[in-house]
Amino acid sequence: MKNLWLFLVRYNAIFWFILFFVLSVILVVNNNNFQRASFINSSNILVGSFYKQVNSWKSYLSLSDANEKLAAENVLLRQQIQNLLQADTTADSVYLADSIEQGRYAFIVANVANNSVHQKSNYLTLDKGSEAGIEKGMGVITSNGVVGIVLQTSRHFSSVQSLLHPDTKISVTLDSSGIFGSLVWGSNIDPRFAMVRDIPNHVQVKQGQKVFTSGYSLFPEGIEVGEVIETGIKSGESFLDVKIRLSTNFSNLSHVYVVRDLLVKEKETLEETSQDNG
Amino acid sequence: MGRIIIINIVRFFILVLLQVALFKNIGYYNVAAAFPYIFIIFLLPIGLPNLLLFILAFLTGLTVDAFYDSVGVHAAACVTLALYRIFFHKVTLEVEIKDSFNTPSLGEMGTKWFLSYIFFGTLIHHLVLFLLETFSFANFLYTLASIFLSSIFTVAVLLLMSLLVYRKKSRISNI
């Protein structure tokens, strides 16, 4: 007994090390599961408000840039309104918006309090949380591209898993062909580029072709993601990979929109029932 | 004694702040990044009990994890660094210094000792950090390269910091 005690005292450093190391690794593994992210993250009130404060100083530097972007978006929206109004004035309008689709998505505006592009797994922190209606699993977009998926929310903050993350996968389609692929970051180095994986071999992909969201995921259909810059990268027998330039500029995000799918409950229940049957 | 505790607490806040507000945004993509916050663990008093050292290292890691959204990764790396610290002190220091409550800083311990202390510690910390972060041995060469480059980056920043606050004290450790 005495020897055992001496042994424990002598090598206590190792035992403490094993204890704490295993504890950390358990935390890592738990956190890797998408659903069970713990409370130690950037949507936590302390960390969130710190980032918000830092951002409130930093945002002055990019104010003119942000203004310009918002103005450009205004012009675009104004044009769209104009088009819709014109379509309405003709007696037999051909505007065929589905009344169900029309009310399907709601957008919540949020400011980016913290953003990273230099890590292997990048996350953003938004300055709005569950109080503003943001929930886990919603999509996040900007005026000209996709940003990521909401990972965790607290009352006033939410943390977002950026597209620049090895686990993010978004269903996209190449314009005019209706071919689907999945958008992943892939390179893990450069925040300007990403890959579209699993495009069937027979499809002719041209450089400069635009890539849009497909509507099969959390995002509304037809949001521009980027354009093709390199084709013909083989990824096995019958699939191709394509390198694209992202339209979202991740290094100076300021305002983003959180997409709230109002029909998501209905969709989930339906999918659940069909799973039960199968 | 009281002064040392206060200095360590102030150092903790300054280095964590620098890490998450400044060094998080600096780096060559993710090939090379600096993590100078590990200075907190390097500079804890020498005679600290092992358990306390591990707890402090673990908490430091968790704090940084919260800002990096990477729960556990930095904590594990810091705990490994604490183990390295214990062994390094055991091997290189004499008994009377080991029981003192001195800060193992550049001015206190001499350049040669300090350099090897910092360099190998950083290497071990980054090794655990990057391997846990990738969580696989795929692209191992790439990971190794980033471990090595990041270590050099961090060591450079740490040396810069210790030169900034350099104060030559009584050279108790002329070993």
Image (cartoon, grey):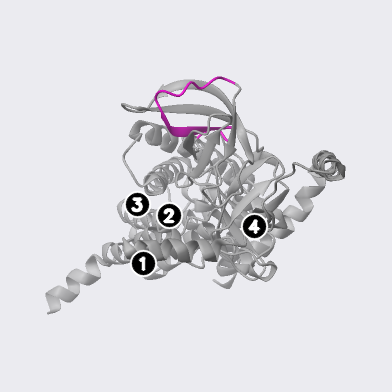
Residue at 65% from the left image edge and 38% from the top image edge = A248
The disc placed on residue B34 is: none
Mark 1–mark 2 distance (CA, rounded to whole Å): 21 Å
The disc placed on residue B73 is: 2
Front residue (pair A162, A16): A162
Q: Over which residues does the magenta segment extend? A: A189-207
Percent position (x, y) of residue B95? 34, 61
Which chain does the numbered disc 2 sit on?
Answer: B
The disc placed on residue B88 is: 3
User: Which residue position holds label 1?
Assistant: B50
Q: Are marks 4 and 2 on the same chain?
A: no
The disc placed on residue A100 is: 4
Percent position (x, y) of residue A68? 84, 39
Could you tell me the amino acid type at mark 1?
Asn
Q: Earlier in the sequence, mark 1 or mark 2?
A: 1
| Quadrant of the rendered image containing residue A198 | top left
Query: Image height check: is B77 above or below A35?
Result: above
| Quadrant of the rendered image containing residue B28 | top right
Q: Earlier in the sequence, mark 3 or mark 1?
A: 1
Mark 3–mark 4 distance (CA, rounded to whole Å): 68 Å
Mark 4–mark 2 distance (CA, rounded to whole Å): 45 Å
Under circle 2, the secondary element is helix
Residue A199 magenta-highlighted: yes
Could you tell me the amino acid type at mark 4?
Ile
Q: Where's the N terminus of chain A, which quadrant? A: bottom left
Could you tell me the amino acid type at mark 3?
Phe
Q: Is residue A112 visible?
A: yes
Front residue (pair A190, A213): A213
Specify few, some or many for label 2: CA neighbours under 10 Å numbering under 14, 14-19, or 20 or more: many
Residue lying furthest bottom in this view?
A1
Percent position (x, y) of residue B123? 40, 42
Q: Are marks 1 and 4 on the same chain?
A: no
